[in-house]
Image (cartoon, grey):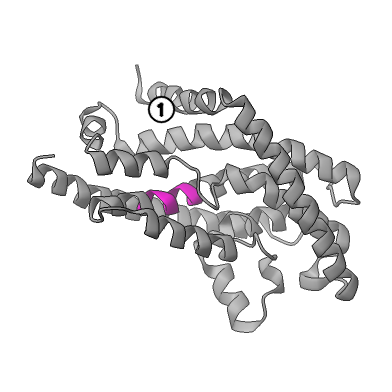
Amino acid sequence: MGAGRLYAAVALGGFRRYATYKAATAAGVFTNTVFGLILVYTYKALWDLKPHLGGYDQAQAVTYVWLGQAFLSTLAISGGGVEDELMERIRTGDVAIDLYRPADLQLWWLSADLGRAFFQLLGRGVVPFVFGALVFPAYLPADPGTWAAFGLAVLLAMLVGFGIRYLVALSAFWLLDGTGVSQMTWLLGYFCSGMLLPLNVFPGALGTVVRALPWSSLLQAPADILLGHGDPLRTYVFQGAWAVVLLGGGRLLQSVATRRVVVQGG
């Protein structure tokens, strides 16, 4: 089997694996919809007081809320990606089996996470977004090109999200338990990705800093393209640069970590 076919099979396996949890998916759809409703009414009250806050009108703000609910599990912004399993395999030593596979460790887990992400997008993200667009006045571009540009930004967001979480997972090679690192990263990511509020509304230096961090690639960058506030090319360059930095950093840390496994006889 060629390398491309191997990783495609891993991604398909990740998709099918999550597709088996039908009850969990239905519960997730319900949870995302409920939280979406709470946030929509909160945003509507805020935008009634501050029209065009962050450059968005109320319809764009509503769309932003439902994008956030669609991306929460897709991009594992608050956890739930393959990093949990990888950290457990590192803790138990089962990662040694992964290193014996005729496959690259990083690409294997990236493929598995992409399969998971695409299922979560289709299985858990689309329904709340469609519900929100039907129930509330929402901003939906009529131009197919805008949707295509948005789709590419979502794919790049998946790469950036995995890059962050892969680095977190590799910390388990040095820590007895990486749960603390994961939780701190999730909290930071939840705030800096724009899940609480669009990063456009953050004032001054704070807004500049959070928009420069990799987490802004996850929600804010794709949302800006869909809502007509972002230049696609500049967005792709920003996301792509962070993807290269994070995946490259993961590659380097992986090399150091696997040498540690050999030295320890793992």
- Toward which corner of the image does residue 40 lie, by quadrant? bottom right
Residue drawn at the location 51% of the way across and 31% of the way down: 115
Outermost residue to the top? 1
Q: Where is residue 100 in the image (x, y as percent from the top left)?
A: 20, 29
Residue 99 relative to residue 213: left or right: left
| Picture layout, residue 100 above or below residue 31 | above
Comparing 266 with 6, the one in front is 266
Residue where numbered disc 1 is placed: 7
Q: Is residue 238 visible?
A: yes
Above or below for 258 versus 94: below
Q: Is residue 148 left or right of residue 42?
A: left
Quarter location, residue 65: bottom right
Magenta region includes residue 59: no
> What secondary structure is marked by label 1?
helix
Bounds of the magenta segment: 160-167
* Residue 126 x/y as whole percent: 72, 37
The quarter in which the C terminus is drawn is top left
Residue at 57 percent of width and 60 percent of height: 190
Q: How crowded is mark 1: few (under 14 residues within 10 Å), some or many (20 or more)?
A: many
User: Relative to residue 22, is residue 229 depicted above or below?
Assistant: below
**Could you tell me what secondary structure mostly forms the magenta stretch?**
helix
In the figure, is residue 196 to the left or right of 245?
right
Residue 144 visible in rendering: no
Front residue of 229 and 130: 130
Residues 52 and 44: in front is 44
